[in-house]
Image: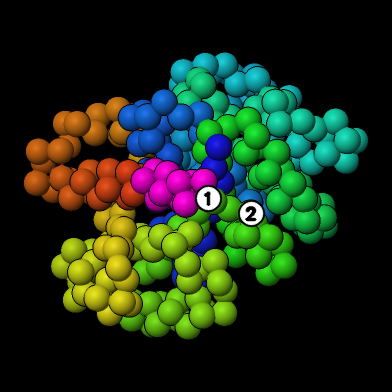
Amino acid sequence: MSIVTFWNNGREQTGKTLSISAISTYLAIEHNYKILVIATGYQDETLKNCFWKEKKARKNLGLFGPNTTLEDGITGLSKMINSNKLSSENITDYTKIIFKDRLEVLQSFRGSQEEYRKLKKIYPEIINLANKYYDLVFVDLDNEIEKDISDIILSNSNLVVASISQRLSSINKFMEIRQNIPTLNSKKTLLLVGRYDKFSKYTVKNITRYMGERNKVLTIPYNTLLFEACEEAKVPELFFNIKSLENDERNSLFVEEVKRASENIVYRLQDLATMKM
């Protein structure tokens, strides 16, 4: 059971949430993992838009199973924690089921900003509880989470995926930041370029060489089909048809890199677990 936190610095668009949707969906389909994705932002519907459309009925069917939600996402969980009734097993009662027994999403907080300020303090507790029940907990770490809370989440994570862009300023900024955050400067962190453009001067090989990385930096290439699927709640459908895209010149790099990023995450988790033994 492992916590994988996706981090980026500042408000720069790095495609972090879209990368999470792609990697979590691929792993849920190709591996026998029970995965939870946690959105930590405030009223951020980016992740929700990747997987489902809002319906008026409180109870509805997920793609591969019923949604057992009592109250939406983190809002309901926060009330359970305040009444000391939350356990790792009943977190699933508040998630959106994408694939039954494979992939679930705990959507972002949708209450008041004052309530959100209080809730942010208990995100580490929620994440750690979830880790006792799910094989993989993917955390979409929001930039509005205060540093002290963010540091706890990063410290508790088995792996951190640092999302950067191909801009030289973004690369240099990350290289500076990681000198002051030990977790980001360790084997516990993988680097991932979201919205990757293979025609950029800053190719994955050049970035890897420039940053002095021992392992090739991961990428999730910009892909029109993924972008549209993330707007239309069709990411699951996209990945069910992924094999048909492998021999398509326009989409083959995207498929190849999603697979590489996903498998590298699994391999690094296994490697780090072996080191602790």
Disc sitting over residue 144 in the figure: none
- Residue that protrudes farthest toward the front in the picture: 277
Where does label 1 land, which residue?
276
Viewer-proximal residue among 265 and 240: 265
- Residue that protrudes farthest toward the right in the picture: 83
Q: Is residue 110 visible?
A: no
In three-dimensional space, the C-alpha distance between marks 2 and 1, rounded to whole angstroms, equals 15 Å
Secondary structure, mark 2, is helix
* Quarter of image, res 170: bottom left
Judge from the rendering whether residue 120 lies leftward or rightward of residue 92; answer left or right.
right
Residue 251 % position (x, y): 17, 45
Is residue 3 found inside the magenta-colored segment of the image?
no
Q: Residues within 10 Å of mark 2 (few under 14, many from 20)?
A: some
102 versus 208 height, above or below: above
Nearer the camera: disc 2 or disc 1? 1
**Which amino acid lies under the numbered mark 2 shown in the image of this protein?**
Asn
Could you tell me which residue is drawn at 60 percent across and 59 percent down? 154
Q: Residues within 10 Å of mark 1 (few under 14, many from 20)?
A: few
**Which amino acid lies under the numbered mark 1 shown in the image of this protein?**
Lys
Viewer-proximal residue among 177 and 170: 177
Residue 95 % position (x, y): 63, 31
Region of the chain picked out in magenta, as a range: 266-277
* Quarter of image, res 84: top right
Could you tell me which residue is drawn at 52 percent across and 46 percent down? 277
Where does label 2 land, which residue?
156
Secondary structure, mark 1, is helix
210 versus 76 height, above or below: below
Quadrant placement of the N terminus: top right
Residue 120 % position (x, y): 74, 55
Is residue 271 found inside the magenta-colored segment of the image?
yes
